[in-house]
Amino acid sequence: SAVISQKPSRDICQRGTSLTIQCQVDSQVTMMFWYRQQPGQSLTLIATANQGSEATYESGFVIDKFPISRPNLTFSTLTVSNMSPEDSSIYLCSGVRTGGEKTQYFGPGTRLLVL
Amino acid sequence: QKEVEQNSGPLSVPEGAIASLNCTYSDRGSQSFFWYRQYSGKSPELIMSIYSNGDKEDGRFTAQLNKASQYVSLLIRDSQPSDSATYLCAVNTGGFKTIFGAGTRLFVKA
């Protein structure tokens, strides 16, 4: 399996502030994704992190709210900007390894609570 | 729109029984199929992958794929309380993006 780490593992933030989540993957990972999982819900894809270029966002997610960087193959950040309590969620970094199986692996997640 | 459908449950089975989890998908071009287990408060963990029609066994887990019926299932034999979790079905249609179902909650009663 791919090795994916995230930090912070959890945070409590005040509304109106921003939080940047970092994700580090092993060198076997090619594609990187960011997901959100709200309490009791399934995974929602936020965006595909593209190396050296702008991320590809899914419907309902915009760069101003969720800026994403991927300066190199193994590192990406997701920022949750101008947070509100509705942003309270688990944010998951995910990666797909090289090779034909396209198996997707997940980091441990960042649990965010916005007060 | 490509979809992956699962019964949300909860599915409740007694300890030692077989738990059967089902999933259907809409895109006939789908090529890769995965089952993830997610414990409460944790991230999804891959437990099975299957790529061709038929059964694939790994320990107490058996994945079954029927592409003609667009149906994939997961059987858990000798279910244990530690198997209690949400099980996510995931389907890859050929690109690098995988579509996840909403998950089925499984409770194994001791």
Image: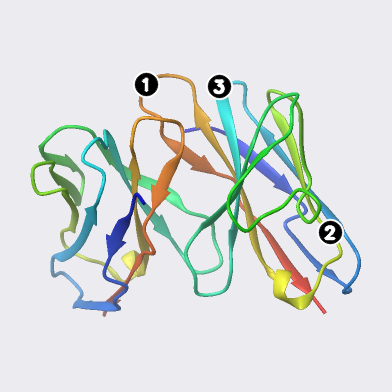
Q: Residue sitting at 46 percent across and 38 percent down?
A: B97
Residue to which mark 1 is pinned: A100
The CA distance from mark 1 to mark 2 is 36 Å
Q: Residue sitting at 57 percent across and 24 percent down?
A: A30
- Image coordinates for residue B61, horizontal then vertical, percent: 21, 50
The CA distance from mark 2 to mark 3 is 30 Å
Could you tell me which secondary element the residue under label 3 belongs to?
Answer: loop
Give the amino acid type for the residue marked by disc 3 in the picture: Gln
Could you tell me which secondary element the residue under label 2 belongs to?
Answer: loop
* Label 1 chain ID: A
- Image coordinates for residue B100, horizontal then vertical, percent: 40, 53
* Label 3 chain ID: A
Give the amino acid type for the residue marked by disc 1 in the picture: Gly
Residue A81's tag is 2
Residue A28's tag is 3
The CA distance from mark 1 to mark 3 is 12 Å
Q: Residues within 10 Å of mark 1 (few under 14, many from 20)?
A: few
Q: Residue sitting at 69 percent across and 37 percent down?
A: A55
In the image: residue A80, left or right of residue B18: right
User: Closer to us: mark 2 or mark 3?
Assistant: 2
- Image coordinates for residue B82, horizontal then vertical, percent: 35, 66
Sequence-earlier tag: 2 or 3:
3
